[in-house]
Amino acid sequence: TAFHKFNAPIMMPRKSADEELELSQAGASTVTILLSRSATTASGNSTQDSATAKIAVIARSPHKRSAIEDKIVHNLQYFTFLDDRRSFANVDALLTRLAPVGTVYLACTETVDDARGAGGKKGNRAAAEVTELMSKLENVLESRSDVTTDASNSGCDNDICVNRLDTMSKNQATALAKSSLKHLLGGENSEAFLAYRGDKQLDSEPLVEWCLGQFFNADRSYREESDESKGTYRIEAGTLNSHLSLDRTAAEAIHLLPPRSGSGAALITGGNGGNN
C-alpha cells in the first residue's frame, strides 16, 4: 500500500491594522515632466528665451495615512519653473527631493514636426532645438541612478525608468486632467475638486494641467474610475523654496544621502538599519 504525504496548508497570520497602514505607505514616486521651449500664460501670451526652458512636473507619491479611515492613497504635487537648458539643474535638484523615484515620464508640448511647421531654416532650427532639449533632459534623468531603488526600477534597461510620451493636444490634455481628477478627488461637488477648480495658480499656469493630462494618459491605471478609487487622490502645489535645494553633487559632498549600495563608501558608525 502506498502512502502519500500531504502538507497541511500554512496559515499566515493576519496583518494588523498598523501593518496594513505601513504597507500602504511603501513605494516610490511616479514623476511626469513636461517641457516647453516657451513660457505660456493663461492669456495665451508666449515668450521664448534661448537660455531657459519652461518645465512642469507632476509627482505622484504614496500618501502617509494618519488612520485606517483615511481614504487618501496618493498625493499629487505639481511644480512649474524655468530651468537652464544646458544642465536642467532645477529638475536635477527636484529629483533629489522626490526620491525614491520609480518611473519617470517625459513629454514635450510640441513634436519635431510641429516645430518644423514654420518652414525653411527657422523651422529646421526649431526642430533641432526640440530634439536637443529632449535628449539633454532625458540624459539628466537617466543619470540619476542615486534616487531610485532596486524595487522601483525592475524591468528597465537603465537604473531609472524614463519613458517618452507622445505629445497630446493641449485641449485633449486639459479635458483628460479635469475628467480624471473629478472622480479621483471625490466627485464634482467634493471639497477637494472644488478647491482644484478654484486654484488660481493652476489658472495662471496652463502647463500644469497639460502635464496632468500627460500623466493620466501614460497609464490607464492612474485614472481608474471605480468605487474604490473615488476620492483616493489629493492634489497640492509643491514648493521649490521651502527646503534646501540640492543637486546630486552638493548632496554627495556633504553626505546627506547614504552611499549607494556596492559603491565602496564607508557608512558612518553608530547607526543601524532601523535609523539609517
Image (cartoon, rainbow, N blue to C red):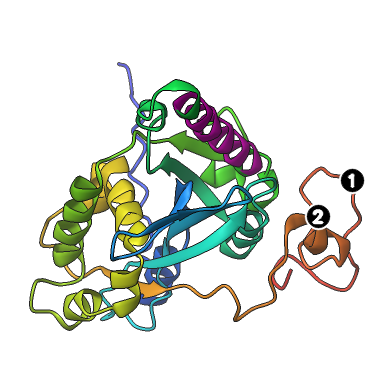
Q: Residues within 10 Å of mark 2 (few under 14, many from 20)?
A: some
Q: Are marks 1 and 2 in contact (CB under 8 Å)?
A: yes
Image coordinates of residue 46 in percent, x first then y, are 39, 56
Residue 48 in view in this figure:
yes
Q: CA distance from mark 1 to mark 2?
A: 8 Å
| Residue at the spot 33% in from the left edge and 23% down from the top edge | 3
Q: Amino acid at mark 1?
A: Gly
Image coordinates of residue 217 in percent, x first then y, are 26, 43
| Residue at the spot 28% in from the left edge and 40% down from the top edge | 168
- Provide the major secondary structure of the magenta segment: helix
Q: Which residue is mark 2?
A: 259
Q: Which mark is residue 264?
A: 1
Please report the bounds of the magenta region as a residue range: 123-140
Question: In the figure, 198 relative to 157: above or below?
Answer: below
Q: Amino acid at mark 2?
A: Pro
- Residue 160 sits in quarter: top right
